[in-house]
Amino acid sequence: MTSMHTQPPQRTPAPLHAPAPQRTPAPPNTSAPQPVRPARVGPAHRVAVRSGRAPSHPFNLCFHGIGTPLRELEPGEEEFWVGVDQFEQMLAMIRHHPFINITIDDSNASDFTYALPALLDHGLTATFFVVAERIDSPGALSSTALQELASSGMRIGTHGLAHRPWRDLRDHGLEAEMRAARIIAEIAGAPVREAACPFGSYDRRVLGALRRHGLRRVYTVDRGRAPYGAWLQPRYTVCKGDTPADLEQLAYPQHNWHLTARTLVKRLR
Ligand SMILES: [Zn+2]
């Protein structure tokens, strides 16, 4: 598998607001065949602005990889990789909607290569959910890239130890996954206070473990909405076929109450 870290690596002191890393030229994007419509501020936004209605709930987006994967993907994962241009155009839309939160899972190398410079270009931040055992493995974030994300103002969260569905684990396995937060924090040189459940897998026992380990916010992939500050936050998983306009429409749902109800059922079972 991959190397584990029990000691924080030597860090070269990074300035608080480090400059954006040099961008490497984007490789040909063979993984996004659909043309991407240009970002625009759509009708949903204009209606909301006209009516003076500020959304009372954040809209959380869950991204995965960007561009061409540099590691072997898990079954079905390719659908969740977006193109470099597609990601840029989504950020150009998101910057007009401060209530849209960006999260990026799985600690792919593209977090540093593409996401960080694009976020900085647009004046945006994101939470990066890191898989501890993937750090420094091929196609994944390196230790130094992880430190650079943190020192550039990005938040670092835990996506567990080995990218396993937490609901399926016995107690000792679940505890090992919970301890990944400390490992990631040591390597990143930054606090880790938020978690994202791998595969959106959770139940009451998993949530109890996350609370015991002091995680202050937990993200799922249940879609729907939760109020600002809620401990359990649903997310919409961005897919290869999504356009900026699609996301903008989803960000202003007057009709997503049934998705919130589904989250309630999962946390009680
Ligand atoms: Zn994941």
Image: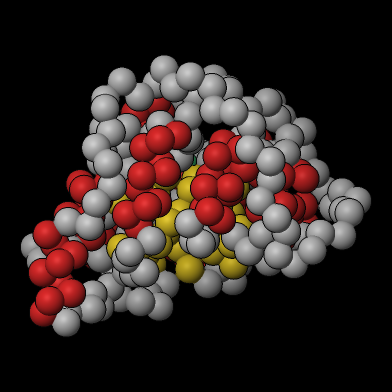
**Which image quarter: residue 173?**
top right
Residue 31 locus on image (x, y percent): 39, 21
Outermost residue to the bottom: 52
Along the horizontal axis of the image, is 196 left or right of 203? right
Residue located 34% across and 28% down the image: 79
Residue located 79% across and 63% down the image: 15
Residue 214 vs 37, above or below: the answer is below
Asked whether 211 or 68 is in front, the reply is 68
**Which image quarter: residue 155?**
bottom right
Q: Is residue 221 visible?
A: no
Residue 2 locus on image (x, y percent): 71, 30
**Which image quarter: residue 239?**
top left
Asked whether 33 or 10 is in front, the reply is 33
Residue located 69% across and 41% down the image: 22
Asked whether 248 or 205 is in front, the reply is 248
Residue located 28% across and 47% down the image: 39
Along the horizontal axis of the image, is 130 left or right of 50? right
Along the horizontal axis of the image, is 259 left or right of 236? left
Q: Is residue 114 visible?
A: yes
Residue 107 locus on image (x, y percent): 58, 41
Residue 102 vs 4, above or below: the answer is below
The quarter of the rendered structure image containing the N terminus is top right
The quarter of the rendered structure image containing the C terminus is bottom left
